[in-house]
Image (tube, grey):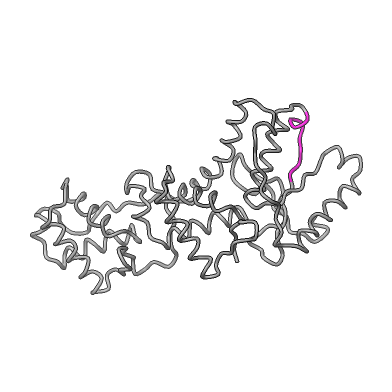
Amino acid sequence: LKDHGYEVRKQVGCAGFRVDLAVVDSDAPGKYLIGIECDGAKYHSSPVARDRDRLRQQILENLGWCIHRVWSTDWYRNRKETEERLIGAIEKVKREPKKTLPRKHIKKAEANIDEKHELELVEISELLSGCLADSVPEYEVCKRLGISTVNGIHEKSTQKLAEAVSSVVEVEGPVHVDEVIRRIRTLWGLKRTGSRIQDALMDAISVAASYGYVIKKGDFLWSKTTKEIPVRRRTGDPPAKIELICDEEIAESVKLVIKSQHATKLEYLIIQSSRMLGIQATSDNTANRISKVVNSLIRKKQLTKMPNGMIGFA
């Protein structure tokens, strides 16, 4: 493939779910023209392995991959013809870059395998979400406010509390105002936020924003030093709730999913984006919010919806 001028990458994907070889699209270096799967000894030794491999290929195709399989027997017996078929498949995709294979419905009857192996296939598709989530850092929680917490919150000046707000945002931004208040209250050793404390901290947030300590966008506070939008996996604190995550971070998680998979159906995109953010159960509320962000990216022409429903980069 390299002798024919193609840029090739090996083992594209994540542990347990990798495409053997992927040919880079020279017109769009962040995308792949085709994925190449090679069979091995285990493939020929077990009917179940063959069925699982076929369904695995269907999952990859559902995610937007165009897959070409190279059989070892053909490679060794008819190498020239096999090479020509491979090059022909690549050039066909190159001529028709917008064409992707239609989604195929995966049915147990088609696979002819038992429930145990069907469950393993479901786990294969779920593995994509898990390994993508593992690829992003965990959410970092602020542990120091930078001011004394000896006296009560309401006894501190608004200026001092604004400094505490800045300390939290510097570590956790972009962060929802409710989380900033909860973090300060927790680090102060308090179990609840009364109305007096709530008012004092809301005033401090306003001062921090007006003085330029932080940047306020709607209900979210950003560090003034933020250059790249972080994508973080929530593991309990803060709670993984979609309403506590800004649109910008959701958008970045969506882009990371597409970057790793070339293109994908909206339902896959929503699930994998939510897992990346630490949300383990994708509720209707979560799905609707991510879907709105995806539609916004499409309107901004950062993403595109292909004729077959796949979502990819514009």
**Where is residue 263 shown, x and y percent of the image?**
61, 56
Q: Quadrant of the C terminus?
A: bottom right
* Residue drawn at (56%, 64%) of the image: 303
- Which quadrant of the figure has residue 198? bottom left
Left/right placement of residue 192 relative to residue 128 reads left
Q: Give the vertical position of 124 relative to 140 (above or below).
A: above
| Camera-side residue of 13 and 301 | 301
- Among all residues in the image, which is located at the extreme bottom? 211
| Camera-side residue of 178 and 153 | 178
Total residue callouts: 0
**Where is residue 208 shown, x and y percent of the image?**
23, 69
**Where is residue 48 shown, x and y percent of the image?**
70, 28
Q: Quadrant of the N terminus?
A: bottom right
Left/right placement of residue 231 relative to residue 110 reads left
Left/right placement of residue 286 relative to residue 144 reads right
Q: Is residue 188 magenta?
A: no
Q: Give the vertical position of 92 relative to 233 (above or below).
A: below
**Where is residue 274 shown, x and y percent of the image?**
45, 49
* Residue drawn at (61%, 48%) of the image: 13
Which portion, as a residue range, is magenta?
37-44
Q: Give the vertical position of 235 relative to 116 (above or below).
A: below
* Residue drawn at (38%, 53%) of the image: 242
* Residue drawn at (43%, 68%) of the image: 227
Q: Give the vertical position of 293 relative to 186 (above or below).
A: below
